Amino acid sequence: MIRIDAVTKRYDDGTVAVDRLSLDIPDGAITVLVGPSGCGKTTTLRMINRMVEPTEGGILLDGADIRQQPVNSLRRSMGYVIQNAGLFQHRTILDNIATVPRLLGWSKQKARGRAAELMERVGLDASLAKRYPYQLSGGQQQRVGVARALAADPPVLLMDEPFSAVDPVVRKGLQDELLRIQDELGKTIVFVTHDIDEAIKLGTMVAVLREGGRLAQFAPPAELLSAPADAFVEDFLGADRGIRRLSFFPSDALELATAPLVPLDADADRLAAAADAPYLLVTDADGRPLGWAEPGAPLDRDRLLDHGRPFRPGTDSLRTALDGAVLSPTGWAVAVDGDGRAVGVVSQQAVGEAIRAAHGRAGAEAKAAR
Ligand SMILES: Nc1ncnc2c1ncn2[C@@H]1O[C@H](COP(=O)(O)OP(=O)(O)O)[C@@H](O)[C@H]1O
Ligand SMILES: [Mg+2]
């Protein structure tokens, strides 16, 4: 664990960048530092690998003051990724990634082998190995930056706004990739961003900092959304807090109705059995949803209402289920399995009840934790 213990950083000109900050950063998880520009995020990150020294307080790594170990070995245990990747422009992609292993004295061959392995891990095609950084897109360069930081397999990754300079679509891809890599490797990641949505998506724990380098709140993202500590945090979280919080509630407790599911070639008996349903969800021969029909009328493939975007119970959240229900012309959301086959339908009202129940459970859990 990295413990930031009552750390203050005052620069020579008197600027207080970080003010009595205390944080326990858990192992094997992503901890995000988020806050407006100038609130001390980069300063905090740089104190962890001693590129900046605290004025007061200290930082402990697994219980030992980081000043007790040589700065080189400390930095080797911490990969560092920055915005625009910070690649060496005169070195190939492969040699960029192999930098730290080479510094550690690995043979060229072994270091390049490791670099090739990492290219694959971060989703870079092997054909890019011999290119130079300027021949890559911004998103690809960022992946190289991540691969380079991972090359010596450090237990800790420090990432300073690594995805801020790329467009939203590429950024989403990089975020998903980071979550996947984290799942596989279980690094301790300290991730800095000014983007609260990125913080909520990536963070196991999120530290919200305010100007003057003071901690406003340190909590899991679902708790930030449900119980912001003060007006600053609430304002920083922005609009749609309630809806966004639904992303953290699983949809597997939703009770699915199966009576309204009917195949397109249903016979009269089958249709009679579904006659009480407010709408019928018509499926193809494989059970995949085709659209909605009113009960009572003969089934006509060309006259079905759009079934909207289905959700996967268990995999998707209540937010996705609610979205499906809201977008559906019938007000019912369609649930599908991993193969896209309909497994049931659920009404807006039932989703609403599940949301209230989930709020109740989350409230009780938060109370028990206090
Ligand atoms: N080397 C420095 N000397 C003086 N002030 C600095 C220095 N580096 C950063 N600052 C100031 O410290 C504050 C925090 O900066 P920084 O940690 O870079 O914030 P963030 O990364 O959250 O944008 C800002 O007011 C910034 O201007
Ligand atoms: Mg910064």
Image (tube, rainbow, N blue to C red):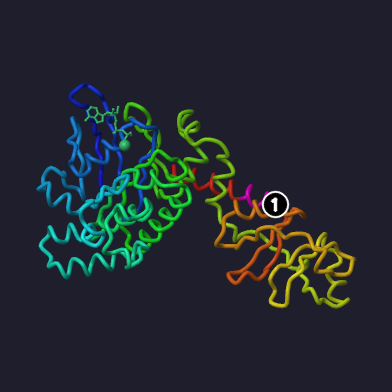
Location of residue 265 (image quadrant): bottom right
Q: Which residue is mark 1?
A: 327
Residue in front for this viewpoint, 190 or 120: 120
Q: Main secondary structure of the magenta part?
A: helix
Residue at screen point 22% across, 39% down: 47
Q: Quadrant of the C terminus?
A: top left
Badge 1 amino acid: Leu
Location of residue 155 (image quadrant): bottom left
Labels in figure, total: 1
The picture quadrant for ligand 2 comes to top left
List x then y, in percent, for residue 184.
35, 64
Q: Is residue 106 above or below residue 188?
A: below
Residue at screen point 71% across, 52% down: 348
Residue at mark 1: C-beta within 8 A of ligand 1: no
Residue at screen point 57% across, 48% down: 246
List x then y, in percent, for residue 212.
32, 26
Q: Is residue 160 above or below residue 268?
A: above
Q: Is residue 295 left or right of residue 218?
A: right
Check residue 44 for magenta coloring: no
Residue span colored magenta: 352-357
* Element at label 1: helix
Q: Residues within 10 Å of mark 1 (few under 14, many from 20)?
A: some
List x then y, in percent, for residue 359.
58, 46
Q: Is residue 123 left or right of residue 298?
A: left
List x then y, in percent, for residue 181.
36, 61
Q: Is residue 277 above or below residue 46?
A: below
